Image (cartoon, rainbow, N blue to C red):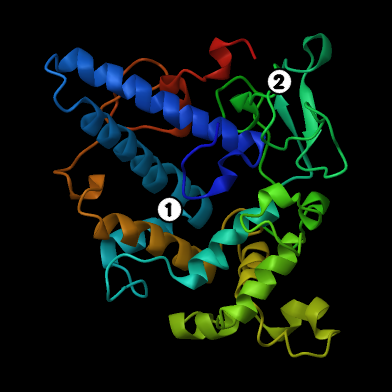
Amino acid sequence: MTAIVADPRNDENMVISGLQCAFIQFHNRAVETVRRKDKSKKRDFEQARQLTTWHYQWMLVHEFLPQFVGQAMVEDIARNGRRFYRPENGPAVPIEFQGAAYRFGHSMVRPSYRANLAGGQDGAAFFGMVFDPALLGSDPDDLVGGFRSSRRFIGWQTFFDFGDGEVKPNKRIDTKISTPLFHLPLSTIAARNLPTVLPQRNLLRHVTWSMPSGQAIARTMGVAPLAAADFGELAVYGLGLEGSTPLWYYVLKEAELVEDGLRLGPVGGRIVAEVFLGLLQLDRDSYVHANRWRPTLPTRHGTVTGDFRMVDFLTFAGVDPTSRGQ
C-alpha cells in the first residue's frame, strides 16, 4: 500500500510516521465529535477537517513559534506586521525559508533516540540510531521508517512533556550535525539521488538557488551581521566564507552565538516567523480570519480552556503514551 501524498517521505522515520498516524487519528476523532453534535452528517468531513486544521494552526502560533523564534518576535509581527515576507502573487514559500532558515532543525537531530519506554526486548525501552544504512532485515535496530514491528512505535513522552518526568531536552541549535545525517539512506531523499550527506545537500541548494548570504540578509533587515571572526572555522578555506556565509550555516551560527542555541536569532527567527504567520494571514480559510476563534476541543485534562498544546493534540488523537502504559 502506498500513501497518495505530495512527498513520498511520509514514512521516512518512525517519528514522522508516528506523527502522521496521530494526525489521521485526530481527524477521525474530530469526525466523531462533529457527528455527535450534528446528526445530519451533511458536512462531517468538511467540519472535521477545519477542526483539525485550526487546532494545528493554533499550536503553531502559540506553542511552536514562541519556542523556536521567541514570544517577543511573534508579538512584534502580530503588532507591527510583516516587514519582509510580502509575496506579490499570492502565498508562496521563499527559498530563504525552505532552503535555509527552516532547515535549522537538522542541527537539532540527535544521533539516537529512545523511541519508547517499553517496546524493546523484555518490555525495556527501544533505543535506536536515527539512521544506519548498514542495517538490514524486516525490523532493523535503527529508527528508519517503512517497517512494521510491535516495537516500532513512538512513546511520545520522550519528545513532549506529559508531566511524568520522561521528556528529554532538545539538542540545541548550533553548527554541529549528528553523524547519521552524513550517511542518509536513499529512502530518505525524495529524488533518490546523491549526495547522501545532508549538510552537503543544504549547501548545494544555496549555490544552485543563488541565495544571498546571511550577512547580506542581515543588512537588508537592519540587523548587525555577525563578525567575520565569528566564522573562523570557515576562514581556513580561503574562499571568503567568513564574510559571505551561506544562509543555512549563518542561521545556525547566529542561533548558537546570539541565543545560546535555545532558539533562532534575529535573522533566522524573522524569516521563519514571518513566513509561517504570513501564510496563515494570506489563507482566508485559516483560523486567524475567524472571529476571535479559540480552540474548542478539551485539553488532555478533559476541560475546554481556549488553549491547545501538542500534548493535548496527542491525547485527543488517542496516542497519549500515558494511556498505553508505554
Where residue 201 sits: x, y (%)? 69, 67
Callout 1 amino acid: Gln
In which quadrant will I find the C terminus?
top right
**Quadrant of the image occupied by residue 47:** top left
Q: Quadrant of residue 16?
A: top right
Q: Which residue is mark 1?
A: 71
State the separation of the CA atoms marked 1 and 2.
40 Å
Residue 6 in sight: yes
Q: Nearer the viewer, residue 261 or 155?
A: 155
Q: Which residue does the image show at 75% across and 63% down from the upper left?
A: 194
Q: Which mark is residue 313?
A: none
Element at label 2: loop
Q: Secondary structure at mark 1?
A: helix
Q: Position of residue 164 (x, y in %)?
A: 61, 19
126 or 250, nearer to the observer: 126
Q: Which amino acid does the dot numbered 2 rest on?
A: Ser
On the question of residue 298 being in view, the answer is no
Residue drawn 72% across and 38% down? 144
Image position of 62 with respect to 1: above or below = below
Along the horizontal axis of the image, is 256 left or right of 131? Answer: left
Name which residue lies at 35% across and 63% down: 76
The mark closer to the camera, 1 or 2, is 2
Query: Crowding at label 2, few (<14), some or many (≥20) Cα neighbours within 10 Å?
Result: few
- The quadrant the N terminus occupies is top right
Q: Number of marks in the image?
A: 2
- Badge 1, how many Cα within 10 Å: few under 14, some, many 20+? some
Q: Between residues 156 and 20, which one lies in front from this camera angle?
A: 20
**In this image, 323 relative to 86: left or right?**
right
Q: Is residue 274 above or below residue 41?
A: below
For disc 2, the marked residue is 149
**Could you tell which of marks 1 and 2 lies nearer the N-terminus?**
1
